Structures are given as C-alpha cells and as structure tokens.
Amino acid sequence: MIHKIKLVMATLLLSLGLVGAFGSPAFAANGAAGDAKDDICSGINSAGGTCSDSGAGLTRVMRLVVRIISVVAGVAAVIMIIVGGLRYITSGGDSSKVASAKSAIVYAIIGLVIVVFAQIIVRYVASEAS
C-alpha cells in the first residue's frame, strides 16, 4: 500500500515537473510588445489621458516576488491536499489518522486562502503606491 502511495506521489511530481517545463506560455518578441504599448499610449494621450509605466521599479519587483512565492505556496498547498486525501483514504477508520488527515487538508486550504489574500493585498498596495 505504501508502495502505491509513493508511486502516485512520484507520478504527480513528475507530471507537475513536465507541466512546468513544457507548459509555459509562449512570449511575444520584445519589438511587437513595445509597438503595441506605444500604440496604446499614443491613443490614450490623444484622448487627453496620460500613459505611464505603473509597473516600474520596486512595485514591479514586489509583484514578481509575491507572484513567485504564491505559485510555490499554491503548489505546496495542492500537494498537501492530495497527501491529506490519500492519508484520509488509507486511514482504515482509525480516528487519529482520520483527524490528522482532515487537519492537513484544512490547513492546506487555509494556506491557499492566505495566498489569495496576499495577492489581493499586494495588488492593492502596489496600485496605491504608483
């Protein structure tokens, strides 16, 4: 039974690794993105607005760091939910094992909620700072 759990976990981790390696989005060439931004800014300026780079400096770095930490924490939380689910399934009715599995699942869900709120707070602070 433990061998099956190890096999499932290894398969899941391998799948996550393959998705991370080959499932990344394609990025457009810098010239095309720069031209599109220039076109948008010229339209905003002609309408009487102002076009500024709000993602510059510390705000951009802060968003990037929080995004990376959020992805890592989110992946860890999902893995813990899966592990908790497997522990719940294999508990065999033992009340202490069931309680331990349920608490692992609850704590992982709380972690996901904290990650979401961290993203919201950082976006709000970054938008107010710029």
Image (tube, rainbow, N blue to C red):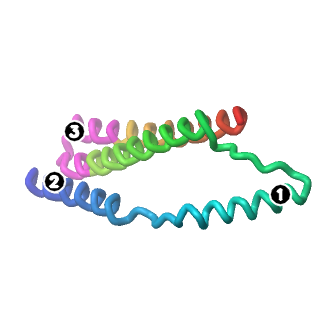
Q: Which mark is residue 28?
A: none
Give me the C-alpha separation between circle 1 and circle 3: 60 Å
Q: Quadrant of residue 10?
A: bottom left
Q: Nearer the viewer, mark 1 or mark 3?
A: 1
- Helix, strand or loop at label 3? It is helix
Q: Is residue 8 left or right of residue 71?
A: left
- Helix, strand or loop at label 1? It is helix
First of labels 1, 2 by sequence position: 2
Q: Is residue 99 covered in magenta?
A: yes
In this picture, is 106 found above or below 15? above
Which residue, given by chain and number where applicable, does mark 1 sit on?
Answer: 44
Span colored in magenta: 86-104
Q: Quadrant of residue 54?
A: top right
Q: Position of residue 93 (x, y in %)?
A: 20, 45
Q: Residues within 10 Å of mark 1 (few under 14, many from 20)?
A: few
Q: Residues within 10 Å of mark 2 (few under 14, many from 20)?
A: some
Q: Is residue 123 covered in magenta?
A: no
Q: Nearer the viewer, residue 128 or 10?
A: 128
Q: Residue furthest front?
A: 31
Q: For the N terminus, which image quadrant?
A: bottom left
> Which residue lies at the image location 75% right of the left edge and 64% below the top edge?
39
Which residue, given by chain and number where applicable, does mark 3 sit on?
Answer: 97
> Which residue lies at the image location 22% right of the left edge and 39% below the top edge?
97
Q: Amino acid at mark 2?
A: Ile
Q: Which mark is residue 5?
A: 2
> Which residue lies at the image location 67% right of the left edge and 64% below the top edge?
35
In this picture, is 110 found above or below 88? above
First of labels 1, 3 by sequence position: 1
